[in-house]
Image (cartoon, rainbow, N blue to C red):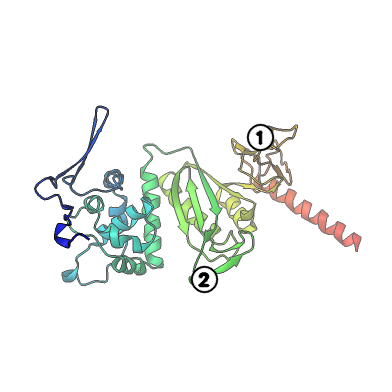
Amino acid sequence: MMSERAMPNPNCTGQGELDLGVIEFGRLGRRVVEGRFDGGSMTSDGGVMLLSAADRKLGLIEAASRCIADPRNPLLITHAVRDMLRQRLYGLALGWEDLNDHKALRCDVAMQTAVGVDREVASAPTLCRLENWADRATAVRLHVVLLEQFIASFKAPPKEVVLDFDATDNPLHGQQEQRFFHGYYDNYCYLPLYVFCGQQLLCAVLRPSRIDGAQHAAAILKLLTRRLRQAWPEVRIIFRGDSGFCRQRIINWCERSDAHPILRVVHALHHGPLVSTHGVSSVTVPGSAHGHSNAGAFRYRPTRRLSCGSPPWPSVVGRWPGCPASSRCAAARRGHYARRSSRRGAGR
């Protein structure tokens, strides 16, 4: 049996033989593989620098930060509202949705540089307090910033503006306030209302899911139309939405305000992605002779066609562009409803 003194101790530290600044891993062909520790601070979110440059050019977050009232003592402020708003929005754009992610993200050198500071940015509790400062008046001011940014993006007044209204689900995975089950989406969710013009967001209203999907749409359409007409008096405004927005209040307001509604009153024949051509509902069924045979296509058909002195326009409810008189449209609808009521009375 060998004594402990005879057992050699392995030199695991490599002191005196290994340069701790460089670790040699040998060669692979002409390639030298080394490990070094002099690279400085590293990040996997380098794209935040591009976001920062675009934001400073647009000035969007700078304008949005002025819409949020800061209740703190100015003498005790460490993180400005503008810096916290940049940190939160940049994190969302990079995929860091949870506030807890900022426990580590606040130490990221790229995030600090993008925000514009050379120290740790705000913590998760500080960002949580920022979000709780927002109220209804703050939301209104932020929407004004979005709308003014949209108007300023045009060098010349456009001839036509299409406002796309859409309600969609925002799934919930906890016990949030105003949490309700929605039968169509088969989930607990919120039901926010969005308004887009092309790729630009004009409005986003967070709502509970137990309401009508078209709720608040008439009021928002009125406010948007009023501001757009102030900036561009001659612009032609088109309100576009699916059958969920076919409400009499919206249609009547469009007729009075010379706005052109395009409401898709449709039946879905097959679930899949929407196929649309120049604003007219197109018809495509997998394996059908009426269209392509590619799987997953979507076919829509209008439920009713109306004409009033001009060529019929499928899926249009309200006032037609080119109609000689809006009163003729209203008279045609009144006559249709009267005939339908008389037939019901005769059946009884």
Residue matched to label 2: 178
Give x and y (percent) for residue 6: 15, 57
Q: Residue at image x 78%, y 52%?
A: 335
Q: Quadrant of residue 248?
A: bottom right
Against 308, residue 194 (above or below) is below
Categorize mark 2 by other alpha carbons within 10 Å: few (<14), some (14-19), many (20+): few
Apparent side of residue 27 relative to residue 278 in the rendered image (left or right): left
Give x and y (percent) for residue 90: 32, 52
Against 136, residue 246 (above or below) is above
Against 196, residue 87 (above or below) is below
Given this view, does label 1 or label 2 mark the residue nearer the observer? 1
Give x and y (percent) for residue 346: 90, 60
Q: Amino acid at mark 2?
A: Gln
Secondary element type, mark 2: loop
Extreme residue in the top direction? 30
Query: 307 or 292: which is nearer to us?
Result: 292
Q: Residue at image x 27%, y 48%?
A: 43
Query: 213 or 151: which is nearer to us?
Result: 213
**Quarter containing the C terminus:** bottom right
Q: Amino acid at mark 1?
A: Asn
Residue matched to label 1: 294
User: How far separated are the C-alphas under marks 1 and 2?
Assistant: 41 Å
The answer to whether any part of residue 210 appears in the image is no
